[in-house]
Structures are given as C-alpha cells and as structure tokens.
Image: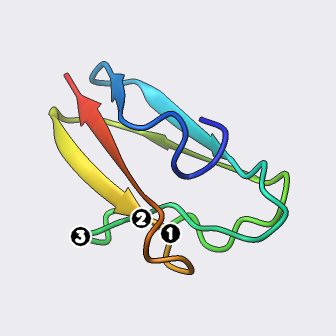
Amino acid sequence: MTTPHNPNPITVAIGGTVTWMNNDTIAHTSTLSNGTWDSGTLASGATFSHTFAAAGTLQYHCAIHSNTIGTVTVQ
C-alpha cells in the first residue's frame, strides 16, 4: 500500500500483513477507527505494517487528515 489510501479498498487473508508506505511529501497516519492500531506519524518514506488475525471489514483513517480514509477487508 503506497499511502494511507491507495489502493483502497484492499482485501487480505487472515494472517496477512498490510504495509503502508507514505509516498507523499507530508506526514500521515494509519489509524483504525476503534483504536486497535495507530501507526503514529509516518514521515515521507516511512512504513507501518499490521498483521490481521481475524476476519472483518475495518475502516481506517489518517489522524492528521480526516478526509483520508481506507478500508481493509480480512477474509
């Protein structure tokens, strides 16, 4: 995943890992709406990975830019 929102949506298998890479020139986060994960601030070029243990559809957002959202479906 190249930024917190591309590609969006994304589907992974249970046990799969998604890696967010900030290819933007400004900082972003990858934060699950219920707080299960929060990447912290990702500077340009930084990455964050999360492994998904259970099925579900999860909406995440950038805590800095509220209009930057995405969805991960775990099957």
Q: Amino acid at mark 1?
A: Cys
Does the residue at mark 3 contact the one at mark 2 (Cβ under 8 Å)?
no
Q: Nearer the viewer, mark 1 or mark 3?
A: 1
Q: SS for tag 1?
A: loop
Q: Nearer the viewer, mark 3 or mark 2?
A: 2
Q: x, y (%) of residue 66?
A: 44, 77
Does the residue at mark 2 contact the one at mark 1 (Cβ under 8 Å)?
yes
State the count of labels. 3
Pointer 3 residue: 34
Q: x, y (%) of residue 70?
A: 38, 50
Nearest to the observer: residue 46 or residue 6 = 6
Cα distance between the residues tagged 3 and 2: 11 Å
Which mark identifies residue 61?
2
Q: SS for tag 2?
A: strand
Cα distance between the residues tagged 2 and 1: 4 Å
Nearest to the observer: residue 40 or residue 22 = 22
Please tell me in which quadrant of the rendered image residue 28 appears.
Answer: bottom right
Q: Amino acid at mark 2?
A: His
Badge 2: few (under 14), some or many (20 or more) residues near its Cα, within 10 Å?
many
